[in-house]
């Protein structure tokens, strides 16, 4: 799941014990505060055990079911190998079985950039393989993932060709304040009051927001931006854009393009915090906060936003917005964001102080565009004119972002929009 997703609720099992399942066939449906989705199988096999019930809340990393596959272990023993090799295979089989029986989540694997299945993690733990050593094991699965058979092959040859081991840095724990539950305030009911339980999504969003406020040192910078050129240019080209591209041209892709430009100029904003470590992100993946019809919030992510031209950005924005409104976002659509933008102007707000979505370090709020009287400087002198203006509200984490960088980043976004060429094509 996404970086900020710590748990999910099982909403339904699509398979039962004894059912045959194919690779990529859905096993169950889950729900998180981010998105509801199906979980596909990564292998062909038979469901032999289901470890959680419907409505159970499961933490990321826990084993929820076991699928028995046609392993190559038995076939290996029939190969023309020496008698001394056969006991090793038997030992590996025991490792696999022991790993299947271990259902507790394995710690410290978040230090790795690779995905490992719970079975592979447990096999590594049973054989004393460190995360660093496991990172060096070649994977033959989807997207280079390490499979059970890869582990079996590696364990057979481990003594002859040990993997290179790199030193692991200790993972710093989060501040104690982040784990403290919010104090419960007594509320007295009055005549006519109605008590409504929070939805599952609202409770999870609440937890994330409180955790962010308790963890990150929130500070804000505000910049006023003249978007008259952007306003006039869009009004001039939006009909031709729709006719040529089949897509509506809103202000959002223009603003996203400006933010992507600023992140390239100030990469210090495109980072994440992991304990006492700062992770410099290579890719610029922009999250765009979107309100759902039920009043909840979701943040789909535009991957590699800096590599998109305006047409590509418009298509990405419209596609994700449509999927969000129709409830069709996939888990991949909401994960790996590196910076987030929220448009509070959609609801009439001229500015806002948004909460940072950890582990990111910044979020930019776009205020409503308004007609305002402004001083216009010309070679012939200054005069008062009507301009289209908006406020950019930048919230950033003062633990790693100082006011200079936070302010310059927001100003860079404004400068990009104010310099918009009204004569350019799209």
Image (cartoon, helix red, strand yellow):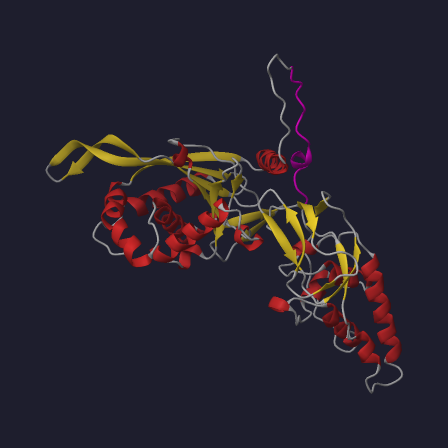
Q: Which residues are magenta?
A: 173-188
All told, the count of numbered labels is: 0
Image check: 224 left or right of 271?
left
Determine if residue 14 is in view: yes
**183 relative to 216, above or below:** above
Which image quadrant for residue 417? top left
Query: At 37% from the left edge and 31% from the top edge, which residue is drawn?
Result: 350
As drawn, the residue found furthest toward the left would be 380
Instruction: Report the front residue among 123 and 70.
Output: 70
Residue 372: x %, y % from top left: 25, 30
Residue 72: x %, y % from top left: 77, 75
Query: At 59% from the left edge and 50% from the top edge, which residue is drawn?
Result: 2
As drawn, the residue found furthest toward the top would be 191
Instruction: Report the front residue among 116 and 57.
Output: 57
Residue 25: x %, y % from top left: 65, 62
Secondary structure mostly seen in magenta is loop
Query: At 85% from the left edge and 61% from the top edge, which residue is drawn?
Result: 98
Residue 203: x %, y % from top left: 63, 35
Query: At 69% from the left edge and 48% from the top edge, which residue is drawn?
Result: 12
Determine if residue 401 is in view: no
**270 relative to 345, above or below:** below
Q: Is residue 72 magenta?
A: no
Which image quadrant for residue 381? top left
């Amino acid at each position: 799941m996404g970086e900020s997703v710590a748990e999910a609720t099982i909403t339904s099992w699509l398979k039962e014990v004894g059912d045959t399942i194919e690779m990529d066939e859905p096993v169950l449906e889950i729900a998180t505060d981010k998105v509801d989705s199906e979980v596909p199988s990564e292998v062909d096999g038979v469901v032999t055990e289901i470890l959680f019930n419907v409505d159970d809340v499961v933490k990321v990393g826990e084993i929820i079911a076991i699928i028995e596959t046609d392993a190559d272990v038995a076939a290996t023993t029939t190969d023309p190998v020496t008698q001394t090799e056969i006991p090793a295979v038997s030992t590996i089989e025991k490792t696999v079985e022991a790993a299947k029986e271990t259902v507790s989540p394995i710690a410290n694997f978040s230090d790795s950039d690779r995905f490992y299945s719970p079975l592979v993690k447990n096999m590594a733990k049973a054989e004393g393989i460190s995360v660093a050593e496991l990172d060096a094991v070649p994977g033959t699965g989807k997207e280079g993932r390490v499979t059970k058979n890869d582990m079996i092959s590696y364990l057979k040859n481990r003594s002859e060709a040990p993997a290179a081991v790199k030193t692991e840095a200790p993972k710093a724990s989060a501040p104690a304040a982040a784990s403290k539950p919010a104090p419960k305030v007594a509320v007295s009911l009055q005549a006519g009051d109605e008590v409504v339980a929070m939805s599952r999504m609202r409770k999870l969003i609440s937890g994330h927001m409180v955790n962010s406020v308790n963890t990150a040192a929130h500070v804000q910078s505000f910049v006023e931006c003249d978007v008259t050129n952007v306003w006039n240019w869009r009004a001039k080209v939006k009909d031709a854009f729709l006719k040529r591209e089949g897509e509506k041209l809103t202000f959002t892709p223009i603003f996203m393009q400006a933010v992507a430009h600023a992140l390239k100029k100030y990469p210090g904003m495109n980072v994440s915090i992991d304990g006492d470590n700062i992770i410099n992100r290579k890719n610029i993946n922009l999250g765009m906060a979107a309100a759902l019809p039920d009043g909840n919030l979701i943040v789909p992510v535009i991957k590699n936003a800096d590599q998109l031209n305006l047409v590509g950005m418009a298509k990405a924005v419209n596609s994700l917005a449509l999927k969000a409104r129709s409830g069709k976002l996939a888990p991949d659509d909401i994960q790996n964001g590196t910076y987030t933008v929220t448009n509070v102007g959609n609801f009439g707000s001229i500015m806002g102080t948004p909460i940072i979505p950890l582990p990111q370090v910044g979020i930019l709020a776009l205020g409503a565009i308004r007609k305002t009287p402004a001083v216009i400087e010309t070679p012939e002198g200054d005069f008062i004119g009507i301009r289209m203006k908006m406020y950019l509200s930048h919230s950033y984490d003062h633990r790693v972002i100082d006011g200079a960088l936070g302010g310059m980043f927001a100003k860079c976004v404004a400068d990009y929009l104010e310099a918009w060429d009204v004569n350019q094509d799209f």
